[in-house]
Amino acid sequence: MKLTLTPSLLALLCSAGLFAASGTLYVRSRAPETPPVVQPAPAATAAPAAVAQPAYSAAQIDQWVAPIALYPDALLSQILMAATYPANVIQAAQWSQDNPKLQGDAAIQAVSAQPWDASVKSLVAFPQLMSLLGGNPEWVQNLGDAFLAQPKDVMDSVQRLRALAQQTGALKSTPQQKVTVATTPASTATVKTASAPSQTVIKIEPADPQVVYVPSYNPSVVYGTWPNASYPPVYLPPSPGQQFTSSFVKGFGYSLGVATTYALFSSIDWDHHDDDHHHDDDHHHHDDDHHNDHHHDDDHHHGGYSHNGDNININVNNYNKITGEHRTDNHMVWQHNPAYRNGVPYTNSQVASHFHQTHVPPGAERDRASAGQPRQSASGGDGAGAAVDGQIPDPAQAPRDPACAAPGLQPAA
């Protein structure tokens, strides 16, 4: 059969074809698209925690420790304690100057009622030493601030300098003091191995526990060539008229011995390591119990502190004789008590925060830590036993209370 394509049929077929084509295009246009694969963003690498920089360099600490590093351990530790109370030291030095004939136990008894820390009271037993401390107030504060901020670094400096003095032949046992060398186990903070190195410590103690000789020496001589010329060692020359037991040997000598039964009330635990040493602080604050508003729990491990001089042990019996207290806890260690700071500001912000002081003098940290600017000249401020404008008081302006100048005061009830 032959199909005749009329014009109308042809138009219908063309329309149908166009409809089919448009439908195909529409379906294709509506076909779902495959969503692109989103790659997860790489995890941000955590920035390493900032490492706190020490407030004082080893060179600065060596500079300040040099004049006392060769003192007997007990006397050294009590000077470090006392240096954290610079206003107390100024007042005690003035008292000692006003009472030049008092020394030893009699001098300590005479100041028993004074509002000073036990470490400061103990040092009036040694008038020649008090003269040195009173004449160099800025050095005293530098030393104390360094000990509060970096006690371990201060003790490390002591050992470093003692080793130098041994090498020059200046530090050795004499009739006045005994020098011993001992080894202690390495800190557990070090990875333990079969060959873990031990540490060598040099200990110094009086040859006679009841007669104390204060060493006198020139650091530039006894230590040999000083390792850092930018920070020369502080030198405390003897006071005019000071007498010595004998002539100096290799730049090292002793003032006349002072008889005392309880002036030395501390000892340094050179075997102590912070990571091995944990205890209940409530049993070891020898002063804070009397000042509840200044009591600090967990002083050793708060605010980034490894310890706060807590490797200085206290002889409770001698401590009680100095303070008139009746303590029975036989395992006390020293802790700084800001109640005896007398308003002298802490120059390090971390130390200030630790002891709840809200203000550090502008530029104080920068001034103390600035390279090439060692501070060793003595300079006083205006005041009478308390800090004024961030300065410790001038010895000439220290108070002269009649009770302070009168010997023979009895312990407070």
Image: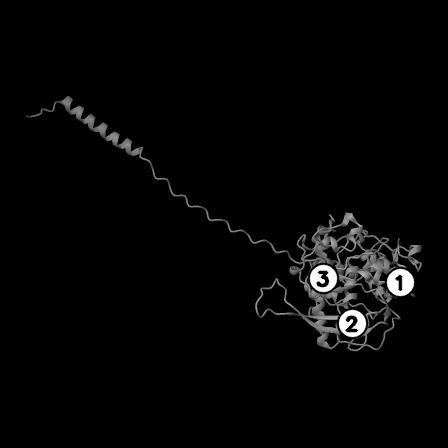
On the image, numbered disc 1 is attached to which residue?
107
Assign the N terminus to one quadrant of the image. top left
Q: Residue 290: image x %, image y %?
A: 80, 51
Q: CA distance from mark 2 to mark 1?
A: 28 Å
From what the image shows, is residue 329 above or below residue 165?
A: above
Classify residue 166 by image quadrant. bottom right
Q: Which mark is residue 311?
A: 3
Front residue of 161 and 274 = 274
Please tell me which of labels 2 and 3 falls first in the chain: 2
Q: Amino acid at mark 2?
A: Asn
Which circle, 2 or 3, is nearer the viewer? 3
Question: Can residue 396 be seen by looking at this rendering?
Answer: yes
Q: Amino acid at mark 3?
A: Asn
Which circle, 2 or 1, is nearer the viewer? 1
Q: CA distance from mark 1 to mark 3?
A: 28 Å
Q: Residue furthest front?
A: 328
> Dot 3 surroundings within 10 Å: few (below 14), some, or many (20 or more)?
many
Classify residue 63 by image quadrant. bottom right
Q: Is residue 3 left or right of residue 280?
A: left
From what the image shows, is residue 90 above or below residue 221?
A: above
Residue at image location 56% in from the left, 54% down from the top: 48
Residue at image location 62% in from the left, 63% down from the top: 188
On the image, numbered disc 2 is attached to which residue?
218
Q: Residue 204: image x %, image y %?
A: 76, 71
- SS for callout 3: loop
> Dot 2 surroundings within 10 Å: few (below 14), some, or many (20 or more)?
some
Q: Residue 362: image x %, image y %?
A: 73, 51
Residue at image location 25% in from the left, 32% down from the top: 24
Q: Residue 10: image x %, image y %?
A: 15, 25
Q: CA distance from mark 2 to mark 3?
A: 28 Å
Question: Can residue 379 be seen by looking at this rendering?
Answer: no
